[in-house]
Image (tube, rainbow, N blue to C red):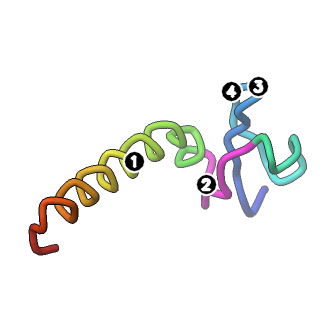
Amino acid sequence: MADKWWYCLTHKTVEPDDGCANKNRLGPYPDQATAGRALEIVRERNEKWDAEDQDWEKGAPG
């Protein structure tokens, strides 16, 4: 069983450690299911960071 899982941006699939080159992947993730949610996780993080940036630019306390 793989210790780390990755989401391949080229093939749009979940891969174990011995998959494509890391430059084409997101991760590592602790399990296959989490790696399968990689694009969702990235979107959620980006939305959170964008909101934090907007708050900071407005001078709102963090």
Disc with the residue nearer the chain's start (1 vs 2): 2
Residue 13 point in image, percent of width and height? 70, 30
Q: Nearer the viewer, residue 1 or 3?
A: 3
Secondary structure category for the residue under label 4: loop
Secondary structure category for the residue under label 2: loop
The residue where tag 4 is placed is: 12
For the N terminus, give its image quadrant: bottom right
Q: Is the residue under label 2 in contact with that under label 1 (CB below 8 Å)?
A: no
Up-down: is 50 above or below 10?
below
Q: Is the residue under label 4 in contact with that under label 2 (CB below 8 Å)?
A: no
Secondary structure category for the residue under label 1: helix
Q: Which amino acid, by three-letter code, is at mark 4?
A: Lys
Residue sticking out furthest to the left? 60
Q: Nearer the viewer, residue 49 or 39?
A: 49
Disc with the residue nearer the chain's start (3 vs 1): 3
The residue where tag 2 is placed is: 31
Mark 4: few/some/many CA within 10 Å (<14, 14-19, 20+): few
Q: Of the residues tagged 1 and 4, which is closer to the observer?
A: 1
The residue where tag 1 is placed is: 46
Measure how far apart labels 3 and 2 are at the Cα level. Answer: 18 Å
The span picked out in magenta is: 25-32
Residue 59 painted magenta: no
Q: Is the residue under label 4 in contact with that under label 3 (CB below 8 Å)?
A: yes
The residue where tag 3 is placed is: 11
